[in-house]
Amino acid sequence: MPRIRKLAGLSVLLLLAVISADASTLTGRVRIIGRKSGAAAVQIIVYAERLDGGSQVQPDEYRIVQRDKAFSPRVLAVPVGSTITFPNEDPISHNVFSLTRPPFDLGLYRAGAAKSRVFGRTGTFWIFCNIHPQMAAAVLVVRTSHIAEADAAGNFRLDLPGGRYLVTAWSERSRPFSAEITVGAASETIDLMLDETKYIDVPHKNKFGSDYPRAAYENKD
């Protein structure tokens, strides 16, 4: 049964470490602790928000494709103000929605159609289909354009202009972990950590805030 990622009873895990560095290229590794046995890996996002002023947010246009009754990519990080288009490449209809505030509902649309949404507020938006409960995606909206995806080993790279930044690691299974850093002219490496100890799954609701009918999990269309 598809489930939304939810954190219950987890105190904020936010460590602010001040790291001085002379770097235009910031590399590092995100270490995972508390992962339950047999749990699959999830995508890790790392982003850097400038602390000393200067323009850093450049909204852009992105796509999350509906194909084979799944969203692709399943996790996407974008600068605030960006537009995401949701094309339907399945031979069946879909209904994209989110109950994350402010909620939205793109309505039912057929194969070959596409609808878009501007994400004008920061935060994590959970995206679902009202017909197919197995379809789930997470959109992380941040106040920066300095965004990277860590690889399977947790390694990441960010190319940053000189200045002071708050660098944050994020995944759908943990609270964010942040470190403050001053970037200069040479390369530097830092380590970040995400804690999955208190991560649990709960079933997500449909767009009306109700449980999906049993037939939805058996739906072949």
Image (cartoon, helix red, strand yellow):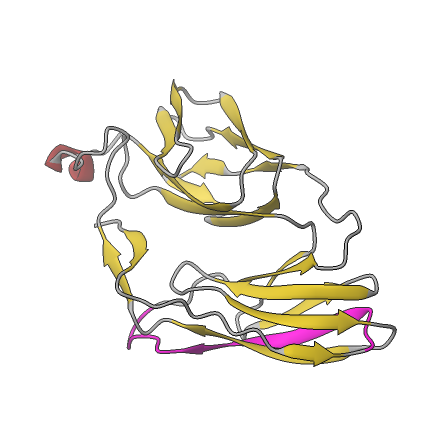
Q: Quick check: is 32 in the magenta stretch? A: yes
Q: Quick check: is 196 in the magenta stretch? A: no
The residue closer to the viewer here, 23 or 55, is 55
Horizontally, residue 219 falls left or right of residue 97, namely left
- Look at the image and give the residue range highlighted in magenta: 22-39
145 in relation to 184, above or below? above
How many marks do you count on the picture? Answer: 0
Quadrant of the rendered structure where residue 108 is?
top left
Residue 175 percent across, percent down from the top left:
42, 64
Residue appearing at x 47%, y 30% in the figure: 89
Residue 109 percent across, percent down from the top left:
40, 19
Horizontally, residue 155 falls left or right of residue 173, namely right
Residue appearing at x 26%, y 49% in the figure: 2
- Outermost residue, left direction? 214
- Outermost residue, front direction? 52
Residue appearing at x 35%, y 75% in the figure: 35
Residue 56 percent across, percent down from the top left:
75, 49
Residue 178 percent across, percent down from the top left:
56, 68
User: On the rendered image, what quadrant is the C terminus found in?
Assistant: top left
The residue closer to the viewer here, 115 or 5, is 5
53 in relation to 113, above or below? below
Quadrant of the rendered structure where residue 148 is?
bottom right
